[in-house]
Amino acid sequence: MLGQQSTTHPHLSAGAAGAKPSRYYPWLVFALSFGLLLSDYMSRQVLNAVFPLLKVEWSLSDTELGALGGIVALMVGVLTFPLSILADRWGRVRSLILMAALWSLATLGCALANNFGEMFIARLCVGIGEAAYGSVGIAVVLSVFPRHLRASLSSAFIAGGAFGSVLGMGLGGALSAHFGWRWSFAGMAIFGLVLVAFYRLAITEPRLQAQRRALGEVTERTSGHESVSLRPLLSALFSARSILCAYVGSALQLLVMGALITWMPSYLSRYYGMATDRAGVTAAAFVLAGGAGMILCGALTDWVARHAPKRKWLMAVTYSVICCVLLLTAFRLPAGTAQLVLIGAGMLFVGGTAGPASAVVANLTHPHIHATAFATLTLANNLLGLAPGPFVTGVIADHIGLLGALQVIPLAGVLAAGFFIVGRRYYTADLLRIESQREARTGNA
């Protein structure tokens, strides 16, 4: 608590005094936080499944459809940083509950929309609700697990976005086919509100604090909602060249992922003649491959880099390049089985950089600003990746067709690989400098 004095050394855990970390509570935290992330992306991506229906019913252009898809990511990018700072001060659990309730109610508003303008406002509110969930949620999850699991946990948690997209598009397509597109949004809203109730009952700040103390993660600097002045905060988030490269490289790779998740149902409808429900389910299978790939790539990264953390950067470069080559090849093939197989293979690697990038950001920042650090990563991911990806694809598609647009978008992976290469060059020096600064502050405490 703020204002209390302690004679305990900052790096000594409560475990030294006899407390033992729970084996099961962290997994409950992960499960419910993961469930809310599913709801987050189900509410965000259900729109993609009903693109063809809205295009016909409201006579929308691809640019307008792209705007409806991109506005959520844009609001996430704009608001994630300030809202995450507020969450670090106001309380992460209370903030998560409020966010989830807001995006669920806004999704219900989408079900009631009668034109483009009303849908746009409802989607904007969905984005406001979802703005800081990813950064605050992952900070809560990582805070109750040991440090050596960060890349795996980060990948698994972030993969919830892909799995949520799968459920949103798959269930959204099925609900729209049987009950109309409005029930697609209503179903996602109900799911979110039910999870909010469970989260409110099971997850509390005191239990999170007890687990962190048992792990040795709570210190005088982390045990309360301590204010951090702006200048030191910005320095911690932006002074290291390697962390800047992690932000930008991660965002550029997610530009590819965001574009594919948004436009695959429309691509399958236009070029394969699939009905809305079948296109949604098929696109969901590709997104499922993306989510599975995130988890596998994160686990592989932890294994390869277990004795050499710098290898995380090389793994990120590898994932970006492989994905780019596979997708560029796929969209230059004629429609058919070979193209679909290569798209699926590319999707296995499209989100592979998420785990390495998140682990790097966690390693280069102090635990008491992790929510803000992940907010910064989320800001970059959305403003430079997930928001422009669907919109830019729609703009290009209006000029050269959707196929032509999807032949260009994967090239962002080459730029992502370049930033990861540069980040690797500076990582060791940045890490040593930051660790020495931490030790100096601890010695003066």
Image: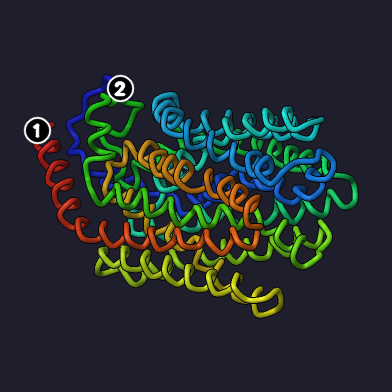
Q: Earlier in the sequence, mark 2 or mark 1?
A: 2
Placement of 263 over or under 376, stated as above or below = below
- Kindly identify the amino acid type of the residue bearing the numbered disc 1: Asn
Q: CA distance from mark 2 to mark 1?
A: 19 Å
Q: Residue 164: in sight, yes or no?
A: no
Q: Quadrant of the N terminus?
A: top left
Q: Nearer the viewer, residue 316 or 271?
A: 271
In percent of the image, x 70 and y 79: which residue is there? 337
Return the residue found at the far bottom. Answer: 338
The percent position of residue 240, horizontal first and vertical second, equals: 22, 46
Please report the residue visible at 60 percent of the width from the left and 67 percent of the height from the top: 289
Measured as percent of width and height from the top left, residue 117 is found at: 72, 28
Residue placed furthest toward the top:
3
Q: Which residue is mark 2?
A: 2
> Is residue 11 visible from the viewing direction of this image?
yes
Q: Which residue is under mark 1?
A: 444
Q: Residue at x 78, y 45 (%)?
A: 55
Badge 1 crowding class, 10 Å Cα cut-off, few under 14, some 14 to 19, many 20 or more, is few
- Which is more toward the observer, 273 or 285? 273
Query: Residue 99 occupies which quadrant of the picture?
Result: top right
Image x and y of residue 32, in percent: 58, 46
Specify few, some or many for label 2: CA neighbours under 10 Å numbering under 14, 14-19, or 20 or more: few
The image shows residue 227, relative to residue 175, as above or below, that is above
